[in-house]
Amino acid sequence: MEHYYHPEIECASREEILKLQNERLVKQVKHVYDNVPYYRKKMDESGVKPEDIQSVEDLHKLPFLTKDDLREAYPYGLLAVPVGDCVRIQSTSGTTGRRVVAFYTQHDIDLWEDCCARAIMAAGGTKEDVVHVSYGYGLFTGGAGLHGGSHKVGSLTLPMSSGNTDRQIQFMVDLGSTILCCTPSYAAYLGESINERGLKDKIKLKAGIFGAEAWTEEMRRDIEKSLGIKAYDIYGLTEISGPGVSFECSAQSGMHVNEDHFIAEIIDPKTGEVLPDGEKGELVFTSITKEAFPLLRYRTRDICVLTREKCSCGRTHVKMTKPMGRSDDMLIIKGVNVFPSQIETVLLNKGYAANYQIIVDRVNNSDTLEVQVEMTAEMFSDSVSVISAKEKELVNAMKSMLGIYAKVRLVAPKSIARSEGKAVRIIDKRNLYQ
Ligand code: DLL
């Protein structure tokens, strides 16, 4: 099997990278056109033929793919190889009806793990390290991705998964974990818990690889201080393989995109026009080496900037800033992707009007979600116990729709401020995007 973990590729010249991207793109477009009727139809409708794509410069001719396409084509409609050639699926942290399922051949798993191995090595990882993986295992890509990457580096891998903080800390102390992989909010919580127990001197952590949700520079400083480590950002999305699409290096100033596997573009989210490097817009990825689920021009909805300034680490691959927001209204709460429309669906199904507000906050490094809903005029005269039973009913319905707990508060009719323009449905007090 061909392996894709070549450290020298990360420092190749722009010309070398472009040559590789051109070759792989041409091959990939043909693969998709020949094997994915869903995308072939899109190309036909746009009047683009595989021969029209000869290099990265032609990329803009291809139609975009969005999460809506993935939903429409769910589950097998974008698969480019026979199911028998796939060895794994992973899925987004989203929920029923919104789930995105991505498929992998063994080759795809291999290249994904290579990308994660690069991230671990960029954080100083070697085979001597003990890599403590506290991302969730299972359908979520975090655990599997960093786990596989750690194996590739040859490090001792601790497949902790998330939760059970006492056990996490005990293993960290007993086995001398040196690199921690988890969400930044869990890292902050672990830091606090370790300090509360007076165990900071007993841990040997030197680095952390944190991603899957937005986090600020301030949070980075807090985590670095409380755990005594250097904290690196890592980015990715299930649709494009998972963590390791891009990752931070020692410069800690943006994440290098693995350009031998993914072509990054920035577009104007309103017009779809491609923007030059340095401009802020929506990040779009084309995967040029994946076999099973090769998405062309996939709109991530993450807003960021790409830069090609020389990096002190020596890597030449383009760097993306931390996501600065989203061009849709998806929220990531406790690592779970939540769409306000799901909350609205629950409310409408239960007979409420769409007068609600979603309040997200972060208390003690843990996300909280509260939904305030206006009761109907008839409910206003109900007793406290009836109201509280109705709130409970909504809590349960939200839990089964979103997969996480939402506090529900029924408020008086007409008490949620009406807006003259777009309704202000979301109040995110976390200020995660800078
Ligand atoms: O969160 C993959 C991942 C796992 C990345 C572990 C890093 C570490 P999804 O569940 O599909 O996949 O969610 C993808 O999460 O479009 C971003 O909006 C957000 N996201 C991922 N990494 C970061 C990051 C994984 N470092 C969605 N900073 C993406 C900010 C991030 N947002």
Image (cartoon, grey):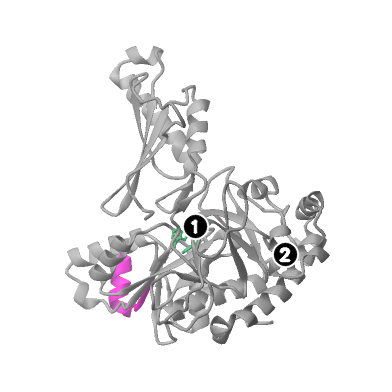
What residue is rendered at 46% in x and 23% in y? 352
Residue 89: tell me if it is visible: no
| Front-lying residue, 387 or 22 | 22
| Front-lying residue, 410 or 385 | 410
In the picture of the structure, the residue carrying the numbered disc 2 is 58
Q: What secondary structure is the magenta-colored segment mainly?
A: helix
Binning the other alpha carbons within 10 Å of mark 1 as few (below 14), some (14 to 19) or many (20 upward) gives: some
Give x and y (percent) for residue 180. Answer: 37, 72
Report the span colored magenta: 167-180
**Does residue 176 show up magenta in the picture?**
yes
**Does residue 209 show up magenta in the picture?**
no
Q: Is residue 353 left or right of residue 16?
A: left
Residue 327: tell me if it is visible: yes
The yes-or-no answer for disc 2 within 8 Å of ligand 1 is no
In the picture of the structure, the residue carrying the numbered disc 1 is 280
What residue is rendered at 57% in x and 49% in y? 269
Quadrant for the C terminus, please: bottom left
Q: Amino acid at mark 1?
A: Lys
Q: Amino acid at mark 2?
A: Asp
Give x and y (percent) for residue 336. Answer: 46, 50
What residue is rendered at 66% in x and 53% in y? 65
- In the rendered view, would you say 234 is above or below 179? above
